[in-house]
Image: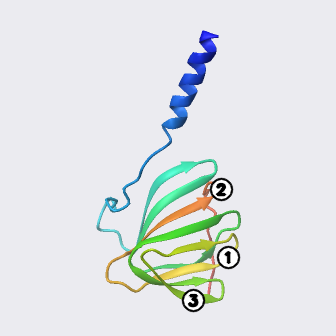
Amino acid sequence: MTRFIIIMSMLALSLSAYSQKIDVKALSPSSGSYDNIHIKKIAEDTFQSSYVIWVKKQVKPHYHAHHSEYIHVLDGRAIMRLDSSNFTIQKGDVIFVPQKSIHAVKTLSKEPLKVISIQSPLFDGDRIWVKE
């Protein structure tokens, strides 16, 4: 019984190690010298990948065949393409991008567009670029 309690305690401690509070206001690119896009991974498990992404200019049209994406705009303004729609996004907006939906952004603000991108399931490089 003691062995069971020790094992369960260790399991509970190891699971809580994945919990975290992220101060998104304090996050900044590792280097200010990136040309267009800077990506910083903030969390990942088998169900999701979460990133903070800074975009100075644009993200070209692409889609994800096997996962969906939530985008929460933290700073900046941009024109977003989502399939056949184009609309302005800005701080506070949340956008859902279903799998296989073509999407792109073009930054309008002087400062980079800063977003949190949560992709589910785990992002495995599933980005298919679309030629226009």
**The residue under label 2 is which amino acid type?**
Pro
Q: Gap in Å between the C-alphas at discs 1 and 3?
A: 13 Å
Task: Residue 40: give its label.
Answer: none
Near mark 1 (Cα within 10 A), the count class, few <14, some 14-19 or many ≥20, is some
The percent coordinates of residue 49 (x first, y second) are 56, 55
Which quadrant holds residue 121?
A: bottom right
**The residue under label 1 is which amino acid type?**
Ser
First of labels 1, 2 by sequence position: 1
Q: Quadrant of the N terminus?
A: top right
Near mark 3 (Cα within 10 A), the count class, few <14, some 14-19 or many ≥20, is few
Q: Gap in Å between the C-alphas at discs 1 and 2?
A: 16 Å
**The residue under label 3 is which amino acid type?**
Asn
- Identify the residue position indicated by label 1 in the image: 101
- Identify the residue position indicated by label 3 in the image: 86
Q: Residue at x 54, y 50 (%)?
A: 44
First of labels 1, 3 by sequence position: 3
Q: Quadrant of the C terminus?
A: bottom right
The percent coordinates of residue 6 (x first, y second) are 56, 17
Which quadrant holds residue 102?
A: bottom right
Q: Nearer the viewer, residue 12 or 36?
A: 12
Which quadrant holds residue 113?
A: bottom left
Residue 38 lies left or right of residue 48; in this view the side is left
The percent coordinates of residue 25 (x first, y second) are 34, 62
The percent coordinates of residue 31 (x first, y second) are 30, 62
SS class, disc 2: loop
Residue 55 lies left or right of residue 66; in this view the side is left
Vertical position of residue 43 compared to residue 110: above or below: above
Q: Gap in Å between the C-alphas at discs 2 and 3?
A: 26 Å
Vertical position of residue 105 compared to residue 120: above or below: below
The answer to whether mark 1 and mark 2 are in CB contact below 8 A is no
- Identify the residue position indicated by label 2 in the image: 121
Q: Residue at x 60, y 10 (%)?
A: 2
